[in-house]
Image (tube, rainbow, N blue to C red):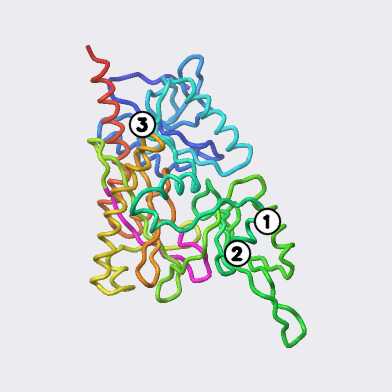
Amino acid sequence: MKKNRTDQQPVIGVLQTESPGTPPFTEPEYCRRLCQAGRKHGVRVIVFSPEWADLASGTVNGYVYGDQRWEPCTTALPSLVYNRCIFSGGSASARTSTALAKLLRSRRTAQLGVGLRGKWDIYRSLSTESGLSAILPPTHLYKGKRSLAAALSRYGGSLFLKPHAGSKGKSALRIQYRRTAQQRDGSHAPLLHITGRDQRNRPLTKQFECTKDGYDWIAAFIGRRTFVMQPCLSLLTQAGEPFDIRVLMQKNDRGRWTMTGTAARIGTPDSITSNLHGGGRAVSVLPFLKREYDPERAERLMEQLHAYSERIPPLLEARHGRLMEVGLDYGIDREARMWLLEVNSKPGRTVFRQTGEREAAVKSVENPILYARYVLGRHLRRVSP
């Protein structure tokens, strides 16, 4: 690959996991939009996998988007990177994770924002904060079959199991314990009913008449991964569809937290999540809340969403290091009580294209570029004579 001419534009790298196809990385559509936003705001965007970096020479083979197509390039390692690597398990994720750790240890580049570790760490960070513990579902680490049985007993025979580091609804399970009851034909109702999604986000359903068999299956499904347990909350629309509210918080061109947009995500009645990757749809929040609750209550809920969402990112940043964006997912029960379900430091933004909120869709892509330009500008001012 030929070396591109260097220029005076600020440069940011976008880290992606290598994948088969053309271009050979994940999120090509989002990366294309980032490149176009970079061109608009005078920032050169280079997309690459950590595996493609040559630390000895300080260069990287990557891709830029120009003339309506992806073009390979070889360039100096950017001093700042926007980490969008997603690790879904397997040897490819392991290689990317190892290469990323090596790249960051080299100190040749810095991250625009750190990645949050996972659900258990976030729960522990926020549960001690006054005013926030009330919106956190009780959360416990899965420590084996005995801990699962105790949690089922504590929460009335039903709970959620979620991967500590998972996203997009992958590997989430709903466990329901049902007492055995003899049917007219002499058979017995299943004792343990499991629904959810596997690691590839495919729906799964399991039934076990013997709880031990069910616990064994769950233990094998989890393997060596870390999972958390939470009670099943009734977070359904009037029509019985699961839903949540996604709030995207990002830093702007002045380094300040701002609410980029909100969207209600509604799942199918047979799903345990509202995630779009599981077949859900997205709609505008306020009209949705007014349909589900009365208009006055809907306005109060919007005020709560704003208040909680403005408070949470700085608290997490103080505990975990510099962040640049977070997706906050809230559930609301039929009594209009709000729950914080998830915090994601690598959030998606396709919800805004689905809801038709063009301004939020544009800002969600431009804000990472504008914040990167702000960070790079501050660095240049510090080192300039």
Question: Whole-Å distance between the Cαs marked 1 and 2?
Answer: 11 Å
Looking at the picture, which amino acid does disc 3 mark?
Val
Per the model, the C-alpha gap separating discs 1 and 3 is 48 Å
Residue 26's spot in the image, x, y percent? 49, 41
Q: Residues within 10 Å of mark 1 (few under 14, many from 20)?
A: some
Residue identified by numbered label 2: 152
Residue 141, placed above or below residue 369: below
Between 32 and 156, the one nearer to me in the picture: 156
The x and y percentages for residue 13 are 40, 30
Tell me where residue 237 sits by quadrant: bottom left
Asked whether 267 falls inside the magenta stretch, the response is yes
Q: Are marks 3 and 2 in contact (CB under 8 Å)?
A: no
Neighbours of disc 3 within 10 Å: few (<14), some (14-19), many (20+): many
Q: Residue 51: image x %, image y %?
A: 54, 28
Between the C-alphas of marks 3 and 2, the distance is: 49 Å
Nearest to N terminus: mark 1 or mark 2: 1
Residue underneath mark 1: 145
Furthest residue to the right? 186
Q: Quadrant of the C terminus?
A: top left
Q: Which residues are magenta?
A: 259-275
Q: Residue at x 44, y 20 (%)?
A: 107
Q: Amino acid at mark 1?
A: Lys
Q: Is residue 88 magenta?
A: no
Whether label 1 touches label 3, CB < 8 Å: no
What residue sits 32% from the left and 60% below the top? 355
Secondary structure, mark 2, is helix
- Residue nearest the viewer, comparing 23 with 140: 140
* Coordinates of residue 242 in the picture (x, y in percent): 45, 67
Q: Residue at x 48, y 14 (%)?
A: 57
On the image, numbered disc 3 is attached to which residue?
45
